[in-house]
Amino acid sequence: SDDAVESTKLFFLGSDEDLALFASALGEASGYRALPLADVSEYLAALDRGEAGLLAVRSTTIAEVKEPLLRRAGRKNDGLCGILVLWAAGEADEDALAPDGLPVYTAQWPPVPRCLRLAVENALDNLMLRRRVLELERHAESRAQELERLNEIGTSLSAVHDLDTLLN
């Protein structure tokens, strides 16, 4: 969706050749533009700046991004991070490599344009919704704390039976 495109960036970690194939499959008309990364630290820096991002990687490079992303997820659950793993036929089992605790989306490699665009769109939409759920959970928690405090105040006020003490 347009909101997902505007609010979430699409990063690509891989060779120039893979990036060219990925970008070609996305197509300019899709509105998606993959931002090339030299290594996973650039992605982590973008997340630390508060930029939501989907990281597209080939399944052959998932091992190098797995641990840094899991460490960050353990420190911060801000809903900014997701991984689009591009799997080729005959490569390692997806479940064995995909990091638990992170949203992982998949697409085939080499990419089929329509399938890749749908996978990217769905992943970006899901990340946007995940961030919104986290925001709503934080808001609900804040409201619950406010209600608890108001309840404490009400309980304290009801314990005082002297009107002059209450008014002063």
Image (cartoon, grey):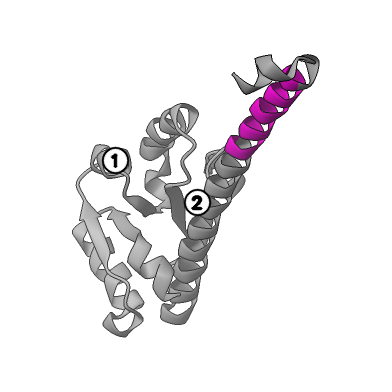
Which residue occupies the extreme bottom position in the image? 29
- Quick one: quadrant of the N terminus? bottom left
Q: Nearer the viewer, residue 27 or 123?
A: 123
Whether residue 84 is visible here, answered yes or no, is: yes
> Residue 73, percent across and down?
47, 34
**Whole-Å distance between the Cαs marked 2 and 1?**
21 Å
The residue where tag 2 is placed is 131
Q: Is residue 54 left or right of residue 13?
A: right
Q: Nearer the viewer, mark 2 or mark 1?
A: 2
Establish if 107 lies above or below 30.
above
Q: Nearer the viewer, residue 163 or 70?
A: 163
Q: Is residue 145 left or right of residue 4?
A: right
Whether residue 88 is visible here, answered yes or no, is: no
Which amino acid type is shown beneath numbered disc 1? Answer: Val
Q: Earlier in the sequence, mark 2 or mark 1?
A: 1
Q: Is residue 55 left or right of residue 124?
A: left
Which amino acid type is shown beneath numbered disc 2? Answer: Arg
Establish if 50 lies above or below 115.
above
Q: Residue at x 70, y 22 (%)?
A: 152
Q: Secondary structure at mark 1?
A: helix
Q: Is residue 69 left or right of residue 132?
A: left
Which residue occupies the extreme front position in the image? 164
Q: Residue at x 34, y 75 (%)?
A: 26
**Rendering quarter of residue 156:** top right
> Residue 112, percent across and down?
44, 77
Q: Main secondary structure of the magenta part?
A: helix
The residue where tag 1 is placed is 40
> Residue 57, percent across and down?
37, 53
> Residue 150, percent across and down?
67, 30
As for residue 156 lying within the magenta part, the answer is: yes
Q: Which residues are magenta?
A: 142-157
Q: Residue at x 49, y 28 (%)?
A: 74
